[in-house]
Amino acid sequence: MGALGALGAVALGGALGSLARHGVNLAFTHSLGRPVPYATAMVNLLGSAAIGVLAGLIASGRLTMTPNMRTFVFVGLLGGFTTFSSFVLDTLTLTHAGDHALAISNVVGQTAVGLAAVYAGYYLATR
């Protein structure tokens, strides 16, 4: 796969994933009057379910994808929709590899460090 092919796959997929995410935000704003936290939760759940189904289909041999298609779907489309799906797939991959300690550390560490980073960033930006 050429670099331009991969970059194009990421760019197109990312654009479509971001548009889909915005569509979910608009739908929740229209139906509930506000998207937070419901739209984010829905995006994370949908993205996680989609990446799980696709990874399972590929692992079972029932679905094949070219490298460019994988890049388009996993990195671009789902990455633009939600990076949470990649995070949970990484955790599943670690668990399937038998690296349970690293899987748990991944969940706890990224959650704790992510919360600390957002609080620190917010604190620094409001001072």
Image (spheres, rainbow, N blue to C red):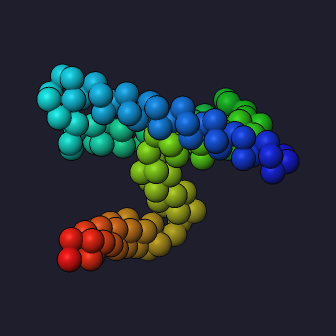
Q: Residue 120: horizontal and vertical position, in percent?
A: 27, 76
- Whether residue 108 is visible to the viewer of this picture, yes or no, is no
Q: How many marks?
A: 0
The residue most toward the left is 33
Q: Residue 27: horizontal and vertical position, in percent?
A: 28, 24
Residue 41 against residue 126 in the figure, above or below: above
Q: Residue 43: horizontal and vertical position, in percent?
A: 36, 38
> What residue lies at 47% left-to-right and 38% top-to-bottom?
18
Left or right: residue 109 compared with residue 90: left
The residue most toward the right is 2
Left or right: residue 112 compared with residue 16: left
Residue 32 against residue 75 in the figure, above or below: above
Q: Residue 85: horizontal and vertical position, in percent?
A: 45, 47
> What residue lies at 21% left-to-right and 44% top-to-bottom?
37
| Image quarter of residue 34 | top left
> What residue lies at 46% left-to-right and 50% top-to-bottom?
83
Image quadrant occupied by the C terminus: bottom left
Which one is nearer the viewer's eye here, 57 or 41? 41
- Whether residue 29 is visible to the viewer of this picture, yes or no, is yes
| Image quarter of residue 59 | top right
Residue 49 against residue 109 in the figure, above or below: above
> What residue lies at 60% left-to-right and 46% top-to-bottom?
75
| Image quarter of residue 96 | bottom right
Left or right: residue 14 compared with residue 124: right
The residue most toward the front is 127
Left or right: residue 47 compared with residue 40: right
